[in-house]
Image (spheres, rainbow, N blue to C red):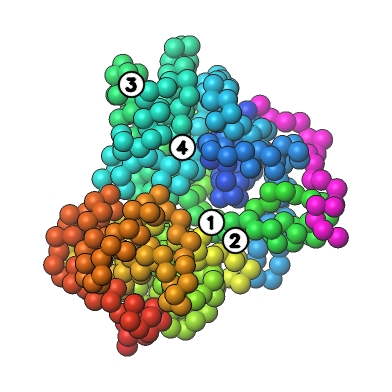
């Protein structure tokens, strides 16, 4: 029987909690990670932390979840089988473009103490190489020019905080759950930049009274595919239009810095509440996200569909292990009590999980936004320290090859990136490999001056790019491993 022919998933008879959280960007990752932590904390020690989800662009998530009263299934995919979680913490889903004022009023409700967000790197409307707000971004222009109809997450946060201040309420805590280094500082910085354009007094109030904790989030959550919906229906006997698939591992490290110290009892359910998240962020962004992106570009070019497929190839497995040992761990200061080598070994086991079909194409999305924090920063630091960084240099070259839009078989790559058209044009207009690389390196939003001005790096990435075109990804990795 087709899953859609099964009875629809529905909410239990348990009482609904009052809403205490509004979340911007209700995608699979948040529903498989933070939402579950919040639900567990509320179940264990109480509190009203129900969630209103907000879709900032499209109605798809609302249309899938509302007919089942916003409940969903989270399937934990272990190598030996699945564990089912029935999640009821989401109370409603709003679609921002349909009625922006309703979203602002929901965020400004006195019961709401926290606004969380997972809008991906590009959702911060900043330049990844500098962290500064991109005031020429169309969404930012709308945020500034049309107060009643903000477009970006930053605009909604600003206008909701403005309404709370005008109503004599305390601000909410802004808790980002995106993979950005010093993500709390980044979101605070861009919100304040936007606020200073709109109202300097509001900016002063936010800076004084607001709180923007840094976080480190970790759980591999592949995008939900139609076959996942079918699988979920077979397991639970109900039709869930929007389940999430997730690995068993999870980690959440949060800077304990909330407005008036009001938050769920996250520590009771395994969240690490710390004073300084940075060592954890660096460890995860570089060890996990950095190698994820590396494997995504080189794996895709080499014909591998998923991360587990990629590391099942012994050539790629040897490569990623050497990358951790020789280039990544060497530049990291571990969190207290953490062995970085043990962390890398555990990552490799997670990558091998055949139940997690994490597509290389999916991870490769938005590379222009991801590359600076995942790869380029540590690459620059390593070169400055005199370390050999040929593996990460090959990863950069693979990204350059990928955004050219044609794979090793001559087939078109569906490149999903906010700069996709510009990047492809830069590649296409040049005939020589060195000129193609030089053109891509000129994209200042991606590449910092310390790399583009480093003759050794420019020469190495050019040679790596030429090798990828002439020999292919797997051959280049074999040569690196030799």
**Pointer 2 and pointer 1: residues touching (CB < 8 Å)?**
yes
Among the two numbered marks 3 and 1 on one chain, the one whose residue lies closer to the N terminus: 3
- Mark 4 vs 3, N-terminal side: 4
What residue does disc 4 label?
A: 175
In the image, residue 155 above or below residue 420: above
**Closer to us: mark 3 or mark 2?**
3
Report if the CB atoms under discs 4 and 1 are less than 8 Å apart.
no
Between marks 3 and 2, how big is the CA–CA gap? 43 Å
The disc at residue 198 is 3
| Foreground tag (4 vs 3) | 3
Q: Which residue is mark 1?
A: 219
Q: Secondary structure at mark 4?
A: strand
Contact (Cβ within 8 Å) of mark 3 with mark 2: no
Extreme-bottom residue of the structure: 482
Q: CA distance from mark 3 to mark 1?
A: 37 Å
Above or below, 435 relative to 71: below
Can you identify the residue that label 2 sits on?
A: 247
Q: How far from the left and from the top, in percent, is residue 22?
A: 56, 32
Crowding around mark 3 (Cα neighbors within 10 Å: few <14, some 14 to 19, many 20+) is: some
Picture quadrant where residue 82 is located: bottom right
Comparing 238 with 219, the one in front is: 238
């Amino acid at each position: 029987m087709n899953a859609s022919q099964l009875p629809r998933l529905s909410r239990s008879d348990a009482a609904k909690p009052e809403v205490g959280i509004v979340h911007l960007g209700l995608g699979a990752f948040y529903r498989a990670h933070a939402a579950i932590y919040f639900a567990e904390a509320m179940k264990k020690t109480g509190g009203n932390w129900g969630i209103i989800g907000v879709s900032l662009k499209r109605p798809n998530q609302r249309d899938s979840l509302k007919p089942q009263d916003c409940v969903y299934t989270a399937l934990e995919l272990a190598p030996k089988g699945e564990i089912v979680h029935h999640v009821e913490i989401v109370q409603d889903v709003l679609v921002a473009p349909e009625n922006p004022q309703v979203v602002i009023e929901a965020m400004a409700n006195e019961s709401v103490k926290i606004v969380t967000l997972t809008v991906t790197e590009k959702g911060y409307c900043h330049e990844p190489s500098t962290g500064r707000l991109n005031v020429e971004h169309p969404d930012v222009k709308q945020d500034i020019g049309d107060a009643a109809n903000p477009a970006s997450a930053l605009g909604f946060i600003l206008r909701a905080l403005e309404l709370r201040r005008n109503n004599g309420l305390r601000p909410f805590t802004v808790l980002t759950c995106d993979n950005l280094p010093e993500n709390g500082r980044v979101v605070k910085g861009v919100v304040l930049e936007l606020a200073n354009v709109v109202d300097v007094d509001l900016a002063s109030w936010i800076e004084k009274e607001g709180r923007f904790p840094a976080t480190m989030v970790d759980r591999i959550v592949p995008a939900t595919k139609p076959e996942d919906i079918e699988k979920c229906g077979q397991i639970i006997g109900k039709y869930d239009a929007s389940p999430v698939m997730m690995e068993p591992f999870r980690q959440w490290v949060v800077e304990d810095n909330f407005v008036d110290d009001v938050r769920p009892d996250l520590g009771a359910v395994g969240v690490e509440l710390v004073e300084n998240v940075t060592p954890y962020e660096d460890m995860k962004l570089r060890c996990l996200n950095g190698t994820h992106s590396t494997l995504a570009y080189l794996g895709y070019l080499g014909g591998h569909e998923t991360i587990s497929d990629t590391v099942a190839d012994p050539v790629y497995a040897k490569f990623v292990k050497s990358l951790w040992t020789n280039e990544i761990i060497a530049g990291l200061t571990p969190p207290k009590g953490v062995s970085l080598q043990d962390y890398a070994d555990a990552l490799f086991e997670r990558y091998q999980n055949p139940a997690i079909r994490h597509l290389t194409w999916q991870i490769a999305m938005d590379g222009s936004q991801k590359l600076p924090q995942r790869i380029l920063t540590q690459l620059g630091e390593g070169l400055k320290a005199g370390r050999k960084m040929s593996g990460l240099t090959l990863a950069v070259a693979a990204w350059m090859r990928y955004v050219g839009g044609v794979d090793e078989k001559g087939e078109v790559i569906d490149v999903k990136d906010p700069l996709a058209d510009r990047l492809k044009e830069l590649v296409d207009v040049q005939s020589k490999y060195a000129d193609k690389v030089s053109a891509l390196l000129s994209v200042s939003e991606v590449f910092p001056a310390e790399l583009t001005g480093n003759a050794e790096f420019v020469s190495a990435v050019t040679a790596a790019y030429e090798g990828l075109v002439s020999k292919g990804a797997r051959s280049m990795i074999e040569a690196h491993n030799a």
